[in-house]
Image (cartoon, grey):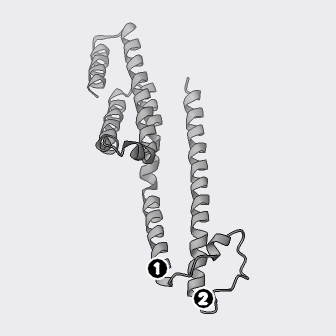
Amino acid sequence: QYASTFVAAERRSSDVQSALKELLQEINCNTKPSVKRVGRALDPNYAEGDNDEDEEGEGEEQDEPTQPASALLADLAEKHRLRRRTLMQHSSLLELLELPSLMDACVRSSLYEDALSIAGFANTLERRHLMESSSSEKKEVEQQQTVVVGVVSEIRRREADLRRMLIHRLRGDVTMPQCLEVVTALRRLNGV
């Protein structure tokens, strides 16, 4: 029963690692040309016709006029600031991606209050990031919000699992306090 949870967590971990590797490769590919342009702009010995550098297949970049170093440095600084901000939010992003597996663990461990708190947070997340953009930009925003959409849909599936588990528990022999706990959880789940 719990083996599937560990396999799913291991699969998610490998998916996150591969996504981070792809992101690092993309960052390297996008920044290398900028670094070379800034290097050329700062090099006093560089002449417009110099092509003896080891430029592997970057012919379209060499055709660009050399921009002033200050403009190139400003561009690099802005890109660095954005990447740094993303890196600073790494733990928050990781926690967000782990919410569905955390809710699954709460459901399996019969921690209904915690599971309902996560479901409530998913509602807040959905309202904040998905509902406010219900205008004509919806398709564009949905493409940008694929992580939030995925997390919210996974939590909705876990809510359905929780509802099935609670109803299944009511079908068996339960004491009055257990019955009240389950009914309270079901009512809160319907309110979420």
Asked which quadrant contains residue 8, the reply is top right
Would residue 173 be seen by someone viewing this image from the given angle?
A: no
Q: Marks 2 and 1, how far apart in space?
A: 15 Å
Q: Quadrant of the C terminus?
A: top left
Of labels 2 and 1, earlier in sequence is: 2
Asked which quadrant contains residue 173, the reply is top left
Asked which quadrant contains residue 163, the reply is top left
Instruction: Indicate the amino acid at tag 2.
Output: Asp
Number of residues whose C-alpha sits closer than 10 Å to that of mark 1, classed few (under 14), some (14–19) or many (20 or more): few
Give coordinates of residue 24: x percent, y percent: 58, 59
Where disc 1 sits, the SS reads helix
Instruction: Indicate the amino acid at tag 1.
Output: Ala
Left or right of 152: which side holds 133?
left
Give coordinates of residue 148: x percent, y percent: 41, 42
Give coordinates of residue 3: x percent, y percent: 59, 28
At x 52% / y 81%, what residue is drawn?
A: 67
At x 37% / y 17%, what residue is drawn?
A: 166
Q: Which residue is mark 1?
A: 71
Q: Quadrant of the N terminus?
A: top right
Q: Which mark is residue 43?
A: 2
Would residue 163 be seen by someone viewing this image from the given angle?
A: yes
At x 45% / y 59%, what residue is drawn?
A: 86
